[in-house]
Image (cartoon, grey):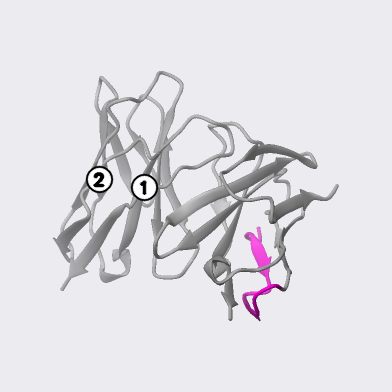
Amino acid sequence: DAKTTQPPSMDCAEGRAANLPCNHSTISGNEYVYWYRQIHSQGPQYIIHGLKNNETNEMASLIITEDRKSSTLILPHATLRDTAVYYCIVRNQGGKLIFGQGTELSVKP
Amino acid sequence: KAGVTQTPRYLIKTRGQQVTLSCSPISGHRSVSWYQQTPGQGLQFLFEYFSETQRNKGNFPGRFSGRQFSNSRSEMNVSTLELGDSALYLCASSWLHREADTQYFGPGTRLTVL
């Protein structure tokens, strides 16, 4: 019962910005958007989260549309180590994260 | 600050046995959640503990259980193991259990059931 839709896969050239989209058209006012990534067989790594405003940290930027129905994760200068599955999650129930299938990002030299 | 630790990292069991997995949260974190990851079902929520109480539970059979201790460390137990229980079991901790509290994941325990 994931509440997000992501493309199954994307490619990005090394050094370029990677823009990963996510649709969450049924999001409600108190639900946060979280992004995690998982490199093969490792635990998911937290990237960034936001409620209404755009957010930036040392890893990435999160752009949330004004109606909050979609968001974009931006990795400004992708490297080969950014190759991973990226999960966009809408979180509304305390400790419960509902993971969808995510986007498999391949960064190519 | 040390991250979430899980022990053991790898485990092999046979059908019908039971198994206990352990999770030590980040220091100061009081909420611990468990997830199961399989190739077919992806990452699925098992349960969440906060202040030694189960706060949320996923859609798994009663063979899957857990508990949390006063120091916030958590264990999960799977009884009467089935082949389909082979998976990566992930633990995540957060300061509290609110939506704004980021969950940080451990490296996982890889369970193989033969």
Q: Chain of mark 1?
A: A
Badge 1 crowding class, 10 Å Cα cut-off, few under 14, some 14 to 19, many 20 or more, is many
Judge from the rendering whether residue B57 lies leftward or rightward of residue B28; answer left or right. Answer: left
| Separation (CA) of disc 1 from disc 2 | 8 Å
| Disc ID at residue A6 | 2
Please identify the quadrant where the C terminus of chain B is shown: bottom right
- The outermost residue toward the right is B70
- Residue A56: % across, % down: 35, 40
Badge 2 crowding class, 10 Å Cα cut-off, few under 14, some 14 to 19, many 20 or more, is some
Q: Residue at x 45, y 42 (%)?
A: A98
Secondary structure of the residue carrying tag 1 is loop
Q: Residue A6 lies in magenta, yes or no? A: no
- Quarter of the rendering containing residue A52: top left
User: Which residue range is magenta in the image?
Assistant: B1-16
Judge from the rendering whether residue B112 lies leftward or rightward of residue B13; answer left or right. Answer: left
Q: Disc 1 marks which amino acid?
A: Gly
Relative depth, front residue between A61 and B49: B49
